[in-house]
Amino acid sequence: MSSKIEEAQEHIRQAEKCLKTSLLKWRPDYDNAAEEYNKAATCFRNAKSLDQCRDCLIKSSDCHRQNRALFHAAKCFDQAILISKEMNKLGDIRGLAERACSLYQQHGSPESGAIVLDKAAKILEHSHPEDALQLFKQAVDVVMLEDSTRQGAEYASKVARIMVKLGMYDQAADAIRREIGLHQQVGSEGAIGRLSVALVLVQLARGDYVAAEKAFKEWGNCCDVAEVQTLESLLQAYDDEDPELAQRALSSPFIRHMDIEYARLARDLPLPKGMTIAPKANVIENAAASYVSPNSGAAGDAPKPPAGPAGDEEEDGGLC
């Protein structure tokens, strides 16, 4: 190991010598300096001195950039990303990837820039999802500048799924709509049908039943028969506040086999609470005496028949 370290240090001394200027040497020799730094990086990597390896790669990249060799400068940052992953310094990866992508774009290779963003985002997706989200967003923008709609839809899908994973449902709904628009441009109706299911789930997660129903009406014609039946049952369940019907719809096979973020969203989606009926009040018999009006007579007195007119009695007696 010590021999590799000594060899690397010798390459660094040669690189620094190449960068010096004098009366007879007005301009630094960036080309040879970059090569010496690159050799030093290889020696440090073999010696498992990864910090120094990455530093040499960055210095080599700077020399290539000064020499207008932008593609080689970007490749050095690309290698530095892998070294950072090996060192488990994942917080540095996003910055390295963005610098590499910028150099690739300046060189005229935006596809390579998008690839390095995608590669870095995949490294960060589980441990640093927020950084991965930003890298995928940049990848969408880079490929769309080149009118690569199909590739843009792929990166947009990753953006939407990470947003769902992070619970950013408002932004996820917008991202899914953008993804649907990209698939419309390439005529992929099957993908639009699957995305319409995802959009309905996201809108329900937002607690917006009206937006979920609107999404189904707008894009449901791209769904296959099973998807339409399931979405109709799901929306009917939320409309009727029927948790059992909603659970059956969310347990349908094609929802369980969607991308894992949407499958988990369906699993954790709050079910409608159902209609609650107020219980009947219990009536206790003979709990209190019946009410008797004070204007009425005694309870035992029988009602008297109404007396007829006095004149009638006299008239009857007189006739007898």
Image (cartoon, grey):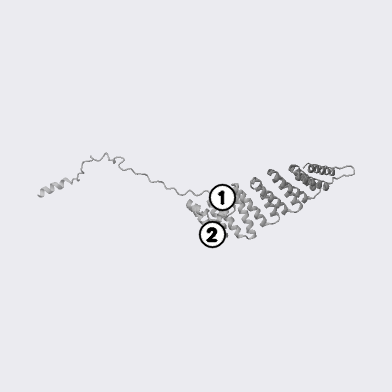
Lateral position of residue 129 relative to residue 62, left or right: left
Counting from the top left corner in percent of width and height, residue 185 is at: 64, 59
Disc 1 packing (10 Å; few <14; some 14–19; many ≥20): many
Q: Residue furthest left?
A: 320
Give the position of the N terminus as an image quadrant.
Answer: top right
The residue indicated by pointer 1 is 265
Marks 1/2: CA–CA distance: 19 Å
Foreground: 310 or 140? 140
Q: Residue furthest top?
A: 294
Foreground: 63 or 316? 63
Lateral position of residue 15 relative to residue 274, left or right: right
Query: Residue 197's image quarter?
Result: bottom right
Element under label 2? helix
Determine the residue positioned at 72% across, 46% down.
83
Q: Amino acid at mark 1?
A: Leu
| Residue 4 marker | none
Counting from the top left corner in percent of width and height, residue 255 is at: 55, 54
Q: Amino acid at mark 2?
A: Ala
The residue indicated by pointer 2 is 226
Counting from the top left corner in percent of width and height, residue 31 is at: 82, 48
User: Can the viewer see residue 228 in this picture?
Assistant: yes
Q: Earlier in the sequence, mark 1 or mark 2?
A: 2
User: Can the viewer see residue 202 in this picture?
Assistant: no
Lateral position of residue 36 relative to residue 298, left or right: right
Query: Residue 84's image quarter?
Result: top right
